[in-house]
Image (tube, rainbow, N blue to C red):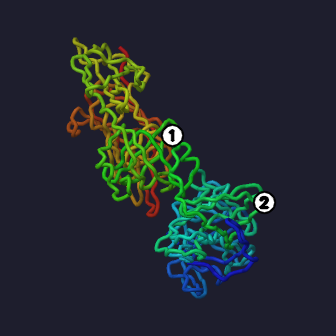
Amino acid sequence: MNMKKIISWGMMLAAAFTLTNCAKEMDAPVQEPESNGYPFEIVASTVDTKTVNDGMSTKWAEGDKLNVFHALGDDPNYVNDGAFTVSDVEAGVFTGTIAEELDVEEEYDWFALYPYSEQVTTPAATSAGYTYIGHSKGLNQTGYDSMASLKGSVCPLYGVLKYGGVKPELEMQHLSSVIAINVTNDTDEPLTITTASFTAPEAIVGSFYINFTDKDNVVYTASEGYSLNTAVVNVTEGTALEKGESAVLYLAIKPFTAAAGEKLTLAVNGYSKEITLAKNAVFTAGKIKTVNFSYDTTEAPAGPSTISVAEFLNLKDTATEYVLTGEITRVVNTSYGNFDLTDATGTVYVYGLLTPEGASQKQWAAAGLKMGDVITVRGKYSVYNNSPQIKNAYYVSHLVAFAEPQINCVDNVVTMTAEEGATIYYTIDGSDPTVDSFEYVEPFEIEETITVKAIAAADGRPSSPIASKICAFVDPNGSGDGPGTPSTTACYTLSTASKQGSNSAYAGACDITVDGIKWNVAGNTQINPWRFGGKSITKVDRAIYTKTAYPAPLSKVEFVSGTLTATWNSLTLVYSTNSDFSNAQTMSAPSVGASKTIEFVPEGGFPANCYFKFILNITNTATSSNKYVQMKEIKFYGYDN
């Protein structure tokens, strides 16, 4: 893909960091869909908006696809016609199927978006159906003065034809603006450029909801949390610039106007300059604005600042390294080191842990890291699948946390042990323990079923992760707490709001331990609420089951659902006192649905030391998108004696 002929707006201004009014025309490529209806074709012109570049020669390419929409003239009820694929690259003819038959005597409004995205279902998107502009992780430019990275979703296109007939021709326009960073080496030392960034007062790259129904007034709405104020370009194969030599780097951004008095920041190889605008600076769709940068220092940039997780997430600065320290609160992958880092202000996901020198991606095992350790890393903000993260963080140091204390309950007596030098603090009311909780001194007896939670702690080391165990009271004259009066208060809750797992695949599974009960979950546990489903599935079972027996008898079990996008056929509960679910009993939910609390109440209740398996039967015939059933909670209810 690439950029077209130059339209000169004026002379370039000479300064350390200036804006000029040079402009070029640009272009872009695609993705996938499916459609049923009436065969149809449209023409998408002009030569200034093609997607394959060979020098200054451009054209559509085989496989290019558009989103197409139509409506009766000025009718806001837009019809989504799905994907149209180029059938004549020279003439710009795209073919597909429309959702309804057209009246040849009517006039229609036509809309097209390039590249095709299944996410976009209307040309008037304001809160759903995002379009990418630029790249949240940074563009990768090979060498200097190259526009080869300006293609595809980096530089999307749109077309609008008002009051057209049944053979529409749409003139495609650009949705992105481009910045050309003209870097001049004004030092006596050679300069090899590896990275540059541009920071604006508003979001300029990432995901946006775009309403392009008025071709003269396109409205961009930033996707909260998935759009950034900083655009980055990473350069490979750059050569050393001698004093006075220049190189150009390119960034695709959302069009915007920076008002007089606002600040813009440009950085090259970590050397940053800020300008306060004396007048408005307009970055127009389909135009290239040149920004001049004088690299006039030989001093190394200052080291990275130490900031909190909340500051890191709010800055959304993809160009600058920062140092963060926090507790490892979730471990996803121990080979490459994927984990959650949590401090007092929030949590950020770390995707990959490098050595301090960046020599290896497997520093996790080398450092002997584990849950509860307090780690210091340095890295840059990035986004993956619309979620913020630190990708390939550099290991700095860590403090080893105590291991979880061991909790045992035999004959109604609770005992606990921990590493030498640690003090155990515990609770028996279900709350999380701190150093202000009960201090464990000696074994104690229980008179009812309780949940014991404990930590190991001492000055100078991080406290352990919380250990949790349900200690079932065994009546010397009977067999546990029940049966008695069924309780109306849950004695155990598996809440997806407070727990994430390591699996994001709908067909995958992972183990998750909550309050001493280990569960195996066959669903996406990295999203709250958890999701069970997939694509191209017909009456497929997805299960969640305990690998730890619940020690006390139960009167009732509840399954709480959330939103449904797939077809939920049934929910079955299987329970057994055997871990392999042999000699199991089965109960079927009388009905299932969205945001529903489904109760299972067997006659006589559930026995002590029982294993539970919930089986969701799901159908989704769509081949290109995952659909799901959300699970919010599972609750266990015991007895009040």
The N terminus lies in which quarter of the figure? bottom right
* Disc 2, SS: loop
Q: Position of residue 130 (x, y in %)?
A: 58, 59
Residue sitting farthest toward the front? 188
**Is residue 566 in view?**
no
Distance from Cα at disc 1 to Cα at disc 2? 38 Å
Q: Hey, which quadrant is residue 361 in on the image? A: bottom left
Q: Position of residue 558 (x, y in %)?
A: 41, 33
Res. 207 mark: none
Residue sitting farthest toward the top? 477
Direction from residue 177 to residue 470 in the image, left or right: left
Q: Amino acid at mark 1?
A: Gly
Residue count near mark 2 (Cα–Cα under 10 Å), binned few <14, some 14–19, many ≥20: few
Circle count: 2
Direction from residue 367 to residue 387 in the image, left or right: right
Residue wearing tag 2: 278
Q: Position of residue 279 (x, y in %)?
A: 79, 61
Q: Hey, which quadrant is residue 29 in on the image? A: bottom right
Pair 1/2: label in front: 2
Q: Position of residue 470 (x, y in %)?
A: 31, 25
Q: Hey, which quadrant is residue 249 in on the image? A: bottom right
Task: Specify which label sits upstream in the sequence, 1 or 2.
Answer: 2
Residue at the (34%, 35%) spot, across then down: 401
Q: Nearer the viewer, residue 198 or 527?
A: 198
* Disc 1, SS: strand
Above or below, 314 relative to 439:
below
The C terminus lies in which quarter of the figure? top left
Direction from residue 57 to residue 532 in the image, left or right: left
Residue wearing tag 1: 346
Q: Amino acid at mark 2?
A: Ala
